[in-house]
Amino acid sequence: MTFNNILWPGLLALVCITGCQKKVNNDPDTIHPDLDLTLKDAATFPLGVGVDYTAFMAGGNYTTLVKSQFDNATPGYVMKHGAIIQGNGSYNFTNADAFVNSVTGAGMSVYGHTLCWFQNNNGNYLRALLAQGGTGAPNNPSLILNGGFEAAGSGVTFLNWSVWNGGSVVSAGTGAGEMYEGARSLKAAPAVAGNPWDVQVVSDDIAMTSGTSYKVRFYAKAAAAGGKFRLSNNGGSAQYSADYAPTTSWAPYEWTFSSNNATKKIVFDMGSTPNTYYIDSISVTLANPPASAAGFAEQQLRIDTTLQHFITSMVTRYKDRVHAWDVINEPFDDNGVLRSGTSASDAFYWGDYLGDRDAAKKMLTNGDSMIAKAFRYAHAADPTAKLFLNDYAHETNTTKMDSLIALITRLKTKGVPIDGVGLQMHMTYLVSNTAIDNALMKMARLGLLVKISELDISVNLGDQQNPQTANFVLSPTMLPQQAAKFRYVVESYLRNVPGAQRYGITIWGVGDGDSWLRNRMPYHLKDYPLLWDDNYNKKDAYNEFLTGLQLK
């Protein structure tokens, strides 16, 4: 579902699936369940909530309910591509970091959402990437070796790099936050003011053409504000960049120069100002590659590369605090076919470029390549994380359900590291109990972890394109029926999903006023799909859901 700055799913560590000690009513025939329990105390599996960043960080009743009632939280928007990727392709983790720190600081877990979705992307950046001129080759390759400082050399800190001065203050950055991506960075910590060349880290020779412009691009940050360093090159007459004054957050920097020699070494001159500097992800490319139209193969490579970088950066950055991810979200159209379309606004159809389409976007196979790549990129970044595929309408759309089952079966056969499936279950109060049972039984038979990932139950059944939907009137019978459906979902989950496969249930929002449905035209204030009302008072839905959690 489209969800701009609103909400998305939750998680708890797998050990809690079977090992959490909960205060549970063990008598399935109890007539009077304990309504004084919190939801998380009653549940025998992880219980999560989709969380809006702004509301959660503001505190108040919203934040209190999230922290007191749930085991885990999922950010609605701040961990998505559109929230992280800036117009120039750089990354901004400010809000995502704040969210993760706040949730984990409260003793809860974070469920990562989402690494690859056709909506909530920085569509402008991705379209600009496609529109760039071609290089006459598959890409404009970087000419520098070991630009990420990942490889150590024999007797030296970094393969393909030398330290000419200041060796005692140069090391590999490996601590939390010390890498932009990967597992190592260049770390230099001059302790006293001096000349720029008092600390020099120097690349191997790079073959160049005199009179040709080259662009050095790298990411940098400093431990404290007020630092500075420069770049230079060695070979022929030395050339110098302006001073760079890095902030305390990772950011990209560039230096373009016209080479005056057939070989050049790239030099980081870092001795002028005391600080601790971190450098990562260096590339040296042609500043003006040959102009030609980018072919489809080149566009595919660009999109594949940028998706891999995004997934790797997200999973690596949060691997110590986020232990499960929605890797792929909503891959299918309602007809059960991999999504394809025209990119506009925040929509971008990754599957049109990741291996299963021709230049006319005609599907060549069944669309597995995009999905397999995303899972493999995430698994490579954190082999311990639980990786999920998440989609909607499986309880009402048999075509979509059959496509999901066939896809997961193929992925497992190919050894793709998929651990679980998320059934969103955005449903109405009139969805049949049999449909709920069938969806959960079929998913459980796949042998994967099963998560109800975005549960809400609408009472306004009007078409969102029909103006009459905004004139909806709540009848006295609707909320009791909604409450009974919330309870039935829990009962069905407990009955149809074996304990070892239960990765939990996430409620998609807190109070009715927070629901994503309230932001869809023309619903406005005319739906009531959650456990608390607009004023955060418990509804019948809360009590029935709590009762269901206490049944065995």
Image (cartoon, rainbow, N blue to C red):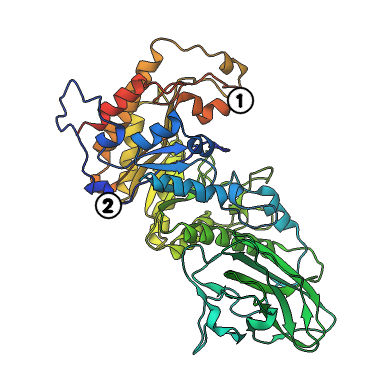
Along the horizontal axis of the image, is 249 left or right of 408?
A: right
Q: Amino acid at mark 2?
A: Val
Q: Amino acid at mark 1?
A: Met
Quick one: 118 or 258, which is closer to the camera?
A: 258
The reply to whether callout 1 and callout 2 are in contact (CB within 8 Å) is no
Q: Determine the secondary structure under disc 2.
A: helix
The numbered mark, 1 or 2, whose residue comes first in the sequence reads 2
Rendered position, 272 above or below 506: below
Quick one: 528 or 229, which is closer to the camera?
A: 229
Residue 74 position, x and y percent, is 45, 43
- Identified at 52% across, 31% down, the residue is 516
User: Alpha-carbon distance for marks 1 and 2?
Assistant: 41 Å
10 Å neighbourhood of mark 2: few (<14), some, or many (≥20)?
A: few
Along the horizontal axis of the image, is 303 left or right of 551?
A: right
Rendered position, 19 above or below 355: above
- Identified at 35% across, 32% down, the residue is 436
The residue to which callout 1 is attached is 521
Mark 1 or mark 2, which is nearer to you?
A: 2
Residue 52 position, x and y percent, is 50, 37
Residue 83 position, x and y percent, is 59, 47
Q: Quadrant of residue 159?
A: bottom right
Q: Residue furthest right?
A: 211
Quick one: 482 or 194, which is closer to the camera?
A: 194
Q: Quadrant of residue 306?
A: bottom right
- Identified at 57% across, 62% down, the residue is 309
Q: Quadrant of residue 23?
A: top left
Along the horizontal axis of the image, is 536 left or right of 229?
A: left
10 Å neighbourhood of mark 1: few (<14), some, or many (≥20)?
A: some
Q: In the rendered view of the protein, which quadrant contains the C terminus?
A: top left
The residue to which callout 2 is attached is 15
